[in-house]
Amino acid sequence: MALSGIQIYKLLPQTNCKDCGFPTCLAFAMKLAAKQVELAACPHVSEASKAQLSESAAPPVRLVAVKANGNEVKVGNEVVLYRHEKTFYNKPGLFVRVKDNEPADALAAEVRKADAYRTNYVGIELGVDGFAVEAASGNAASFAAAVKAVRGASHLPLILISKDAAVMAAGLDALSGETPLICGADAGNWEAMAALAAKHKAALVVSAPTLEDLAGLTEKVRGKGVEDLVLDPAARDLGASLALNTQIRRLALKKNFHALGYPIAAFPAAAGDPGVELMQAAQAIAKYAGFVVLDRFDPAMLHPLLVLRQNIYTDPQKPIQVQPGLYEINGPTAESPVLVTTNFSITYFSVANEVEGSGLPAWLLVCDAEGMSVLTAWAAGKFDADRIAKDAKQFNAAGKVTRKRLVIPGHVAVLSGDLEESMAGWEIRVGPREAVDLPSFLKQAL
């Protein structure tokens, strides 16, 4: 049974040394009880206390990392069911599947294309996290060749898929110094797969048709010394996968059921239909999958999944921000106007994209509003005349232009009078309320 914060505190050194990063041992104990830190953060806890605290120290969902060439995908270690309770931290990895029965040149070309894919979302660069190599041929030599071809085209982490231990061994031998994810172990091959995972220090996917069988299988594999496990509930339709993923997460978090306290793998690649695959992948991202294997590289499918994942795994209490400063758009000159906005990412990119699309040169003064949108920041007292004047001076807006024209958002037109006092010598103009109207405003009014 899990210990309370006070019970944990009694087993700690109680020196308040702060080496754990917390001001007191009690504060650390409370975080440990809430599964928000690991016992290893305390360098002074005794061996006797470690044994007693093992259950409280273990995260409800084990952290599993797949590594290759300096790249890493970390999943698990989550402590809540819903992101409004506490933000989700370790984003599920999106892996693109390739098969070893494809020609080596075609396979490598597909991998290179996916590896190079990047999409920019509110200033954040997103892309695929790795590749899943499936032994569709059932031939050890073909599988090893495919693994080598993928590794030659990309340095991203790999998932190796085969039920045949001999074939899997050939694929693992083609990698060196990496931590791949092996998929997978079941009731018929778990001993051989566990031996391979232990030998190569790889994480292992275990699969079973029921949660009871899955829990029993994880206990058997752990008995062989393999701790980094990933669960495959073997459900391939929307309803069953949603139910099983939710049950696994609840049992791990609410019941502290260690046999199912592992990340989950999802295989929308098995859907066979691109539309169904997209729905299953989106559901897997939203509902607790740690690894999501897609059937092919398709930017039209990948982009919305990456954006969805980014939104779900962004702290809802911390707005996405851009760096305050004076930005150049379309090569502005000393005659170009200075537009003003806040450093909320969506607001910034809305304004910047509209101005850039118009082809008209302008300076964009991005004020520090603690990541709030224009109206929210104004209502909170974080976007006012003093703040705008201060940032204009800090980023030397006056030194960039000879014709001093400052355009403020139409929603805060009330600031124009105060700005005329705070920024003597500047012509204060009130722009449109919506970013979409900026191009016509710039053409007609300036």
Image (cartoon, rainbow, N blue to C red):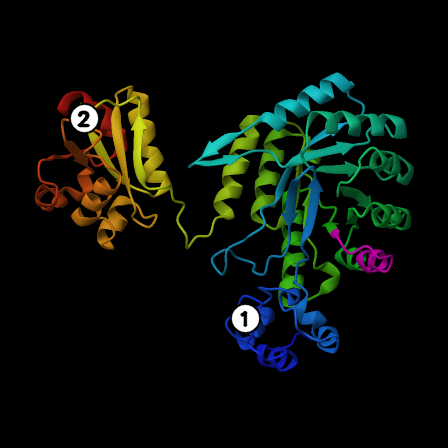
Q: Quadrant of the N terminus?
A: bottom right
Q: Is residue 271 left or right of residue 359?
A: right
Q: Quadrant of the C terminus?
A: top left
Reading the image, the residue beneath label 1 is 18
Q: Is residue 103 left or right of residue 358?
A: right
Q: Is residue 306 left or right of residue 390?
A: right
Q: Quadrant of residue 248?
A: bottom right
Between residue 25 and residue 112, name the one nearer to us.
25
The number of callouts visible is 2
- Which is in the foreground here, disc 2 or disc 1? 1
Q: Is residue 145 magenta?
A: no
Q: Amino acid at mark 1?
A: Lys
User: Residue 102 appears at what percent x and percent y?
Assistant: 77, 21
User: Residue 168 appears at what percent x and percent y?
Assistant: 85, 37
Mark 1 packing: few (<14 Cα in 10 Å), some, or many (20+)? few
Reading the image, the residue beneath label 2 is 441
Q: Which mark is residue 398?
A: none
User: Residue 27 appears at what percent x and percent y?
Assistant: 52, 73
Name the residue at 19% across, 42% down.
411
Q: Amino acid at mark 2?
A: Phe
Mark 2 packing: few (<14 Cα in 10 Å), some, or many (20+)? few
Part of the protein shown in magenta = 216-229
Q: Work out how far the residue at label 2 is from the one at label 1, CA to CA, in angstroms.
A: 57 Å
Dot 1 falls on a residue whose secondary structure is: loop
Asked if the residue at tag 1 contacts the one at tag 2, i.e. Cβ–Cβ closer than 8 Å, the answer is: no
Between residue 25 and residue 305, name the one nearer to us.
25
Name the residue at 56% across, 60% down.
80
